[in-house]
């Protein structure tokens, strides 16, 4: 076994690798950027090396600096996690040329699966079923449009070097093909440095089921399947293992196909073979098609670990150190069911825009596994993926595991940024999902219901008022004011509205709050507050923001009574950056007439492109930014002429 390894990554996957490696007695070296100097993975590692600026291109994508750090620290091997350099064959070759071991597959295996078109041709040779489509070298617009017509609409355009939903567009008809192709190419070029695409038939009731494989360079085994059908914009949201409705016949067929795929390229380490499955009429052994192979550890690997009892990172280290496969296929079995929910800093109400912010409070419930790369006080940076944690639950049955997931999500406490926690909770409670009726269109069909924002009840506002006025821990003189109950008031901003609350502090154990027309009584017994007849949930206060940890987190803001500033209602005159990012393009010029919904600019942030559109009809008065500008959140990009 290695004595020292370097982890060429950050965030939760770096923490995950460090945890297992240190438990195996392996010394761990972390690398970090300017933005990550105080990060959790840096604190966990035995040693940490600074490798550059905050942008990935200046740090986590600098393979030369990472290799230099490994050599300087006496590391024998490098684990690249997932993302960044994990599937870069040139980096793997450079690692090996430096006399180090890459903990993962060979450069040759990564290249074989790195381009979707070439990988599918290889899979056909290996006897693995593939989706009908065009994977040719002719990338002309006309040829691609002709191929789409031959396949039949709807079709999916995919970046050949893609992953994570980037460079991917669904096209319903021929009239939309040209615009979708241009958009997919632009995003693919930015994300992967390769604008080539392929075109495939779109499966109308698709399920995304993938098989975990593990090889030692000559032989491979599979560790059963995961269902990743709950997706939004091709990004996985909740994953589970095993797949609901899976038959032993189909499991055997998919597992065998995945093993053939791995052995066809001499695969070593952990990998995932992804299949698109036709869910119409149930799962059938002839209804699955190869999509791609991810030649690395997957984000959702914990659910496989839960149902097999295997530590996949430990297996990676053992095989990379020269051991053979740690188990035979017949040694592997299923035990129960597991779920993983991806908790992100993102604004659901604003169309799931990635968010930033400092985590003033972060706490996960007992009884669930939470893989996280951040702690209370850490900042969600605009430079990296905004994942806060993966929440994983396991149970003897799907129903028990799902009930535990619901409880775990309800028990997560996050303050300091907006999150998708409420959305995850609504999804976990979805009746169709509870019955196992999953497909990749479920979220889109019910998005409006799943995205409903909870509204604070009077008891929540009263509790927030108690926190704002410092009445949660009253002193012995609380309520004393010339032998009369103490009366106070506080203003709270809830969304766009300001609510004024008043309180009568009768004693240190009794308060009566007036919230609009409703009176809410707060009673303290045994050191615990009951507010409005219910036990008070926990509360976090950070500056003027108060977060009540109920209904997945309810945040309100205390209004400073001395602050007389008023904000004009947004009239759509200014088009502003919703988050920090790079101005990818400006699609408007002064004097141009625009209609509501017209795209005016494209902002690239957190590895995705975001189109900014006109909120009303008007005429462009001024363009305030240029293509290539790095802008802050709220920066004015385009101004329309004022309405008459």
Image: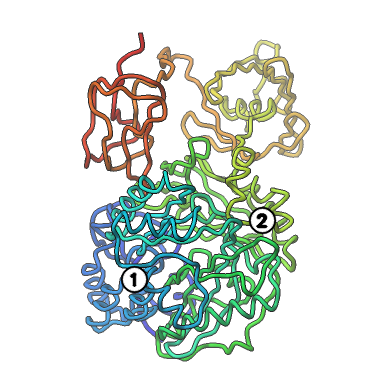
Residue bearing the label numbered 2: 405
- Residue at image coords 26%, 40%: 585
- Residue at image coords 46%, 81%: 262
**Quadrant holding the C terminus:** top left
Q: CA distance from mark 2 to mark 1?
A: 33 Å
Q: Can residue 46 be seen from the camera position used here?
A: no
Above/below status of 624 relative to 263: above
Relative depth, front residue between 218 and 196? 196
Classify mark 1: helix, strand or loop. Answer: strand
Task: Give how far across and how far down residue 283 sits, in percent.
Answer: 67, 68
**Quadrant holding the N terminus:** bottom left
**Of callouts 2 and 1, the N-terminal one:** 1
Residue bearing the label numbered 1: 29
The picture quadrant where one finds residue 447 is top right
Name the front one of labels 2 and 1: 2
Task: Give how far across and how far down residue 260 sits, in percent.
Answer: 50, 84
Question: Does residue 294 appear to the left or right of 537 in the view shown?
Answer: left
The picture quadrant where one finds residue 111 is bottom left
Above/below status of 617 relative to 583: above
Relative depth, front residue between 381 and 216? 216
Classify mark 2: helix, strand or loop. Answer: helix
- Residue at image coords 24%, 23%: 622
């Amino acid at each position: 076994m290695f004595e020292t390894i370097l982890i060429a990554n950050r965030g939760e996957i770096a923490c995950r690798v460090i945890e297992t490696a240190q438990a195996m007695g392996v010394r761990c070296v972390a690398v970090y950027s300017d933005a990550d100097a105080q990060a959790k993975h840096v604190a966990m590692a035995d040693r940490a090396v600074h490798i550059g600026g905050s942008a990935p291109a200046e740090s986590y994508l600098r393979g030369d600096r990472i290799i230099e750090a490994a050599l300087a620290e006496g590391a024998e091997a490098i684990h690249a996690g997932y993302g960044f350099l994990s599937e870069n064959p040139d980096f793997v070759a450079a690692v090996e040329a430096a006399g180090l071991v890459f903990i993962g597959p060979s450069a040759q295996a990564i290249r074989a699966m790195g381009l979707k078109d070439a990988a599918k041709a290889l899979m056909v040779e290996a006897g693995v079923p593939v989706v009908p489509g065009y994977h040719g070298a002719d990338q002309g617009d006309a040829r691609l449009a002709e191929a789409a017509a031959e396949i039949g609409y709807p079709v999916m355009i995919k970046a050949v070097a893609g992953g994570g939903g980037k460079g991917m567009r669904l096209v319903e008809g021929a009239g939309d093909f040209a615009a979708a192709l241009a958009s997919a190419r632009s995003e693919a070029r930015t994300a992967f440095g390769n604008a080539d695409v392929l075109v495939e038939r779109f499966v109308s009731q698709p399920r995304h089921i993938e098989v975990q494989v593990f090889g030692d360079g000559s032989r491979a085994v599979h560790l059963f399947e995961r269902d990743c059908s709950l997706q939004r914009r091709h990004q996985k949201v909740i994953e589970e293992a095993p797949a609901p409705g899976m038959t032993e016949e189909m499991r055997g067929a998919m597992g065998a196909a995945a093993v053939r795929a791995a052995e066809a390229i001499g695969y070593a380490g952990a990998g995932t073979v992804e299949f698109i499955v036709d869910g119409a009429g149930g799962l059938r052994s002839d209804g699955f098609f190869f999509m791609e192979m991810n030649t690395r550890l997957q984000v959702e690997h914990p659910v496989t670990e839960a149902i097999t009892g295997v530590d996949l990172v430990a297996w990676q280290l053992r095989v990379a150190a020269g051991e053979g496969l740690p188990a035979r296929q017949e040694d592997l079995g299923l035990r129960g069911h597991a779920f993983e929910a991806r908790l992100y800093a993102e604004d659901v109400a604003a169309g799931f825009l990635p968010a930033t912010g400092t985590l003033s409070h972060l706490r996960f419930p007992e009884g669930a596994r939470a893989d996280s790369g951040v702690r209370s006080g850490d900042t969600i940076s605009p430079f990296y993926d905004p994942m806060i944690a993966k929440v994983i639950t396991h149970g003897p049955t799907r129903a028990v595991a799902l009930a535990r997931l619901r409880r775990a999500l309800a028990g997560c406490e996050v303050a300091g940024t907006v999150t998708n926690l409420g959305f995850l909770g609504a999804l976990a409670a979805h009746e169709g999902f509870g019955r196992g009726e999953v497909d990749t269109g479920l979220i889109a069909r019910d998005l409006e219901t799943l995205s409903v924002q909870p509204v604070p009840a009077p008891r929540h506002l009263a509790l927030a008022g108690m926190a704002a006025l410092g009445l949660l821990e009253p002193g012995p003189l609380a309520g004393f004011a010339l032998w009369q109950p103490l009366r106070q008031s506080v203003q709270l901003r809830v969304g766009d509205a300001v609510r004024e609350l008043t309180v009568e502090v009768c004693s240190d154990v009794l308060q009566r709050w007036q919230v609009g027309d409703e009176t809410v009584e707060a009673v303290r017994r045994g050191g615990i507050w009951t507010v409005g007849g219910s036990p008070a949930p926990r509360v976090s206060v950070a500056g003027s923001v108060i977060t009540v940890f109920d209904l997945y987190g309810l945040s309100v803001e205390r209004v400073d009574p001395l602050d007389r500033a008023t904000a004009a209602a947004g009239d759509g005159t200014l088009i502003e950056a919703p988050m920090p990012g790079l101005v990818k393009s400006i699609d408007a010029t002064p004097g141009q007439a625009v209609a509501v919904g017209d795209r005016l600019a494209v902002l690239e942030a957190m590895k995705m492109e975001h189109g900014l559109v006109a909120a009303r009809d008007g005429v462009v008065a001024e363009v305030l930014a240029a293509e290539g500008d790095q802008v802050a959140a709220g920066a004015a990009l385009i101004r329309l002429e004022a309405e008459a």
